[in-house]
Image (tube, rainbow, N blue to C red):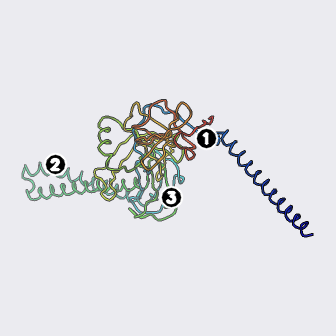
Amino acid sequence: MENSRGRQRSVGRNGAWEHVVRAGVLFLAGVLFVLLVSACSGGKKAPPIKEAVSVSAATVIQKAVPVQIRAIGNVEAYSTVGVKSQIGGELARVDFREGQDVNKGDLLFIIDPRPYEAALQQADANLAKDMAQLENAREEVRRYAELVKKGYVAQEQYDQIRTNSASLDATVNADKAASENARLQVKYCYIYSPITGRLGSLMSNQGNLIKANADTAMVVINQVQPIYVTFSVPEENLADIKKYMAAGKVPVQAVIGNDAGHPEEGVLSFVDNAVDVTTGTIKLKATFVNKDKRLWPGQFVNAITTLTSQPNAIVVPSQALQTGQEGQYVFVIKSDLTVESRPVVPSRTVEGETVVGKGLQPGEQVVTDGQLRLVPGTKIEIKKQ
């Protein structure tokens, strides 16, 4: 009985041991299989395939580039006249509309002329009366001159007659001056435009009593053809500006708003006689014909002064330039469609293009969009424009 139980325990222990052995064999076989596969593959994983980065590109070109100075300008009237009356009286007539274009010599206002016409008639009458008396006095002088020679009248009487004639002569001259002044006052009743230009707001309406030489103008006239654009540039540009003005006319363009395609063309005509010490700038003026009256007093424009032209300049789109720790650089596209980072020395920017003084050659291609995904050696694909 006891032997039978002993045999059963022995058989149970043997079965458990066989199970452990089988599990160990299977584990070793799996490890060997993994090692075998790893050995067959050389122990290296296949590198992932990188996709090409899609970018925009532009070609480096060589061309003549203008040397320009850009500034914000303000349009000013070529001349401004505040029209005032030189005499007082009732404003009898306004002969224009507000905002109207007028020519030099056009009638603008009429001050009631009747009081001044009456004064002129009185002055003319006084002149006529005194001239008649002067003629009579001159005749007496001629008559008494013969009588005093013959001794018929005393010398003192003759001298009195001659003095009276000279006094009347002076009175006539005063009357002539008074008459001319009265005639001038009548002319002042009619106010004409002194320049050709555009009228502003009417300050005095018909029926108002006008004061001579009042503080406020009756209307303001701005001459807009030609017209000025005033702007300031840094004082370091003064030497070049004077140099090119001495050599000939310096063209200036006035760009209105965002209409860069249709600038107004003018000529630099004035350089101020002193640099503004508070800002370090010099004031300039350019004169424009303003044929279509696009420029208007008080308007702000972009003033572009072209001094000269730089031939054979290396030019790239401005968006191609990137800024790094060592300065500015561009991504240049190589023949195998990979990119390299190349430092450049930019000079100046003109209308979205940058002149590069060093680092690029004409015909090379540079990346203009998509630089954030690039590093040197990156494979790229150029977008079709």
Question: How far from the left and from the top, in percent, is residue 286?
Answer: 39, 44
Corner quadrant of residue 174: bottom left
Front residue of 281 and 364 = 364
Location of mark 1 (residue): 53
Dot 3: few (<14), some (14–19), or many (≥20) neighbours within 10 Å?
Answer: some
* Residue 207 left/right relative to 7: left
Residue drawn where x is 90% and y is 70% of the image: 2
Dot 1: few (<14), some (14–19), or many (≥20) neighbours within 10 Å?
Answer: some
Corner quadrant of residue 43: top right
Q: Name which residue type carries label 1.
A: Val
Query: Mark 3 or mark 1, which has the lower sequence index?
Result: 1
Residue drawn where x is 46% and y is 36% of the image: 315
Location of mark 3 (residue): 202
Tell me, yes or no, if residue 192 can be seen here: no
Question: How far from the left and from the top, in percent, is residue 334?
Answer: 52, 33
Question: How far from the left and from the top, in percent, is residue 185?
Answer: 38, 56
Residue drawn where x is 50% and y is 58% of the image: 202
How far apart are the two marked residues, 1 and 2, measured between alpha carbons? 120 Å
Query: Mark 1 or mark 2, which has the lower sequence index?
Result: 1
Q: Secondary structure at mark 3?
A: loop
Q: Name which residue type carries label 2.
A: Arg
| Picture quarter with the C terminus | top right
Q: Secondary structure at mark 1?
A: strand
Image position of 137 with respect to 65: above or below:
below
Question: How far from the left and from the top, in percent, is residue 18?
Answer: 81, 56
Residue furthest out toward the right: 1
Mark seen at residue 142: 2
